[in-house]
Image: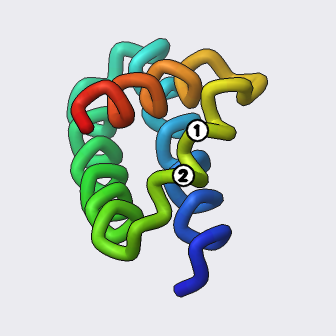
Amino acid sequence: MKNNELIEEYVGLIIEQGKAFEDANDKLNNKIATKAEKVFKKIRKNDYIHKMIGLLNHDNDYVKFAAANALYDL
């Protein structure tokens, strides 16, 4: 999978997770979080972290928060 595809998948999952959070659907939220974590591990493994920096300016606040959190941990 190419780096842009991984980033796009990550963004999509984070947006879904944000919706699940807003709907107070903890089960779905946790399921999506697990998937997003796996995708992030692929991003990190393939050294695509520099692509995450661009997500700090994303339109979706959940994406911005997730990217900031991921980058802060590094």
Return the mark for residue 50: 2
Given the image, on which type of amino acid does mark 2 rest? His
Given the image, on which type of amino acid does mark 1 rest? Ile
Return the mark for residue 30: none
Q: Residue at x 72, y 29 (%)?
A: 58
Colouring scheme applied when the structure was drawn: rainbow
Q: Residue at x 33, y 70 (%)?
A: 42
* Quarter location, residue 63: top right
Q: Position of residue 73 (x, y in %)?
A: 23, 31
Q: Residue at x 53, y 86 (%)?
A: 1
Circles 2 and 1 in contact, beta carbons < 8 Å: yes
Q: Position of residue 52 (x, y in %)?
A: 54, 45
Element type at marker 2?
helix
Question: 6 or 46: which is nearer to us?
Answer: 46
Q: Position of residue 74 (x, y in %)?
A: 25, 38
* Quarter location, residue 3: bottom right
Distance of label 2 from label 1 (alpha carbons): 6 Å
65 over 20 or under it: above or below: above
Question: 67 or 23: which is nearer to us?
Answer: 67
* Quarter location, residue 39: bottom left
Element type at marker 1?
helix
For disc 1, the marked residue is 53
10 over 43 or under it: above or below: above
Q: Residue at x 35, y 56 (%)?
A: 40
